[in-house]
Image (cartoon, grey):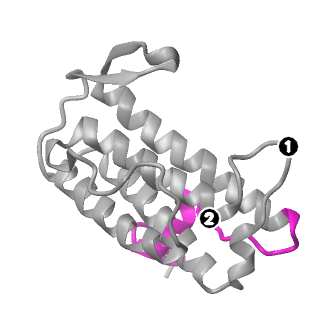
Amino acid sequence: MSHQLNDQVRHNVWSNRYVYDYLAKLPESTLELHVRPGGFGDIRQTLRHIIDSEASYLRRLEPSFDPIPWEFQEDVEFAVIGPRIELLAAAWERLLAGEFDQEALAQARGDGGVVYDVSKGVILAQAIHHGSEHRSQICDILGYHGFEAPEIGAWEYALATGRMREAPASGA
């Protein structure tokens, strides 16, 4: 199904893949870099956290993704994260292929174990926001340590996926 969610969700997936592929080309020691105070942890921990959290959000949005097919918040090697990104990508595509009722309710847990009924539209918004926030932290860590950070904005996604191209010269 084609709807207004395609670019937002696919940009998120593309960004996860792009950051992972970018990091895979850097020295392995780069994955242990962090900036204190602030941030979530080192680069590997932050990327793992993004992916674990997306799995949790998808579990609420896409019934076929329940239960999460790995231990949540387990410490894993970097190479394990790539295949998990691909599992999430497939689940996001299943979500996009069907009807998405953003007003339907799902549950989320807050601090102290409080359970909330929340619209699926808000869960999707949180998934996109959360990933973007933590990917930005990864880019900040890289920049702080003298690495060029990957360009992962919506414009870069659009160029990389053919959703944007140079317009023909006017008057031609």
Residue 111 place in picture, x, y as percent: 52, 19
Residue 125 place in picture, x, y as percent: 42, 35
Identify the amino acid type marked 1.
Pro
Residue 87 showing in the rendered view: yes
> Which residue is label 2 attached to?
44
Q: Is residue 125 magenta?
A: no
Callout 1 environment at 10 Å: few (<14), some (14 to 19), or many (20+)? Answer: few
Q: Earlier in the sequence, mark 1 or mark 2?
A: 1
Under tag 2, what secondary structure?
Answer: helix
Magenta stretch: helix, strand or loop mostly: loop
As drawn, is 40 to the left or to the right of 81? right
Under tag 1, what secondary structure?
Answer: loop
Q: Which mark is residue 3?
A: none
Identify the amino acid type marked 2.
Arg
In space, the residues marked 1 and 2 are separated at their CA atoms by: 17 Å
Residue 2 showing in the rendered view: no
As drawn, is 69 to the left or to the right of 81? left
The stretch of residues the image draws in magenta is 144-170
Q: Are marks 1 and 2 in contact (CB under 8 Å)?
A: no
Q: State how many labels appear.
A: 2
Residue 12 place in picture, x, y as percent: 45, 55
The residue that appears at 41% across and 60% down in the rendered structure is 13
**Of 112 and 1, the residue lying toward us:** 112
- Against 116, residue 164 (above or below) is below
Residue 38 place in picture, x, y as percent: 79, 42
The residue that appears at 62% across and 76% down in the rendered structure is 23
Q: Is residue 147 magenta?
A: yes
- Against 46, residue 118 (above or below) is above
**Of 137 and 36, the residue lying toward us:** 36
The residue that appears at 30% across and 44% down in the rendered structure is 58
Q: Which mark is residue 37?
A: 1
